[in-house]
């Protein structure tokens, strides 16, 4: 362990004391990774997954440096040590004209679902991402959209997609889940958003049993392992990137996912394991799955196809993390 690591520990301790943070240093060979133990709770599982993937490969980096993993503070360290800043991009980029927060969105080249019109490319927190050396996006759909705009060439070149395969595959999760506590859930943080509120009211009107669970953010696998069916719909009519941070982790815990159909969902590489429908079709789909749960569960999780695909996605993520660490080495040349 080098003296620079001890110096970094002192500096990080000072940041924690004066900025109210919970940053931590981890030394891997010649690299020190600094990460936030108190990262946004809503996506903390994904953040931890990225951290763990990077730690597996940073041992191969032969350059002495500091990697800052999506930190609010710490940019001053670049004046003291060779630093690489990694930022996460976790917002929807696939938006329609008039979308909330799309005032500065640029024209893209991806067509809307069932339309010849094209989506805008909305990049939230653009200034932060421009300052980053590497950007990691949870969605291949997002990244394709960014690449469709000639004005985001620099951002696209330093961006990588790592799918949120955040939970390990446990064979017990894919057995018939007839004993699961929750039959059907939604996980809407704000169920009073007009679009989702109207959908939930329709479920109630038709006496379709469900429960909205919005108090579980960390270690969400503990919730999914108790759940039979998850319903996913978009928050607005204008933000169209699939909510993979919800959908993929649920699938990996053996939850049947019924989702509003999403543009370019085939890019996820697991679309065939999701039950898709238009918003107005979802109540009937939910009823059908509730009545035929065992058969539907077996059709998705039975056999080996699902497990093989999930393993392949995990492997692709590992290979992408390896590319990221190679990029870190090249940035330091």
Image (tube, helix red, strand yellow):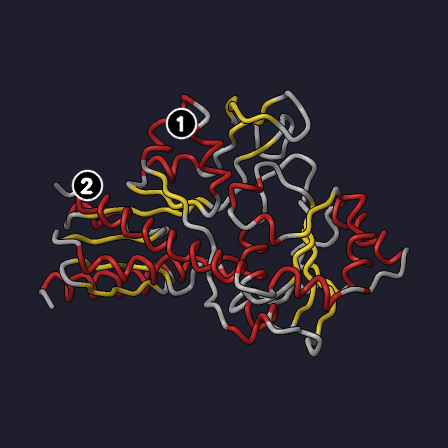
- Residue 302 pos. (x, y %): 60, 65
- The quarter of the image holding the C terminus is top left
Q: Locate residue 125: give its quadrant.
A: top left
Q: Which residue is mark 1?
A: 152
Determine the residue located farthest toward the bottom in the rendered image: 179
Residue 129 to residue 43: above or below: above
Q: Secondary structure at mark 1?
A: helix
100 lies left or right of 46: right
- Residue 87 pos. (x, y %): 36, 46
Nearer the observer, 122 or 317: 317
Q: Secondary structure at mark 2?
A: helix
Residue 28 to residue 270: above or below: below
Spatial CA distance of label 1 from label 2 is 20 Å
- For residue 117, which numbered disc appears in the image? none
Q: Which residue is mark 2?
A: 331
203 lies left or right of 55: right
- Residue 228 pos. (x, y %): 69, 68
Q: Locate residue 189: give its quadrant.
A: bottom right
- Residue 102 pos. (x, y %): 57, 30
Residue at coordinates 75% horizontally, 51% vertically from top-left?
Answer: 192
Nearer the observer, 195 or 247: 247
């Amino acid at each position: 362990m080098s003296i620079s690591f001890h110096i970094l520990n002192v500096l990080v301790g000072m940041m924690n004391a004066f900025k109210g943070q919970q940053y931590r240093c981890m030394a891997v060979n010649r690299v020190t990774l600094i990460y936030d133990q108190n990262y946004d709770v809503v996506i903390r599982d994904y953040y931890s997954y990225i951290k763990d993937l990077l730690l597996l490969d940073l041992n191969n980096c032969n350059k002495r440096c500091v990697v800052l993993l999506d930190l609010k503070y710490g940019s001053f360290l670049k004046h003291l040590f060779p630093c690489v800043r990694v930022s996460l991009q976790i917002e929807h980029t696939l938006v329609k004209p008039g979308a909330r927060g799309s005032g500065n969105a640029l024209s893209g080249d991806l067509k809307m679902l069932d339309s010849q019109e094209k989506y805008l490319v909305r990049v939230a927190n653009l200034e932060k991402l421009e300052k980053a050396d590497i950007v990691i996006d949870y969605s291949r759909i997002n990244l394709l959209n960014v690449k469709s705009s000639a004005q985001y060439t620099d951002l696209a070149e330093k961006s990588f997609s790592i799918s949120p395969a955040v939970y390990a595959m446990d064979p017990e999760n894919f057995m018939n889940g007839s004993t699961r506590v929750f039959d059907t859930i939604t996980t809407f943080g704000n169920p009073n958003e007009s679009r989702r509120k109207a959908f939930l009211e329709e479920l109630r009107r038709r006496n379709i049993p469900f429960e909205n669970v919005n108090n579980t953010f960390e270690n969400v696998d503990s919730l999914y392992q108790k759940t039979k069916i998850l319903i996913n719909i978009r928050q607005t009519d204008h933000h169209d990137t699939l909510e993979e941070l919800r959908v993929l982790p649920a699938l990996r815990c053996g939850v049947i996912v019924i989702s509003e159909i999403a543009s370019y969902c085939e890019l996820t590489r697991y679309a065939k394991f999701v039950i898709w429908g238009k918003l107005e079709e979802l109540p009937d789909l939910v009823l059908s799955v509730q009545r035929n749960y065992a058969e539907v569960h077996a059709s998705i999780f039975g056999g080996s196809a699902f497990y093989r695909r999930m393993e392949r996605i995990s492997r692709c993520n590992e290979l992408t993390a390896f590319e990221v660490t190679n990029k870190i080495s090249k940035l330091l040349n």
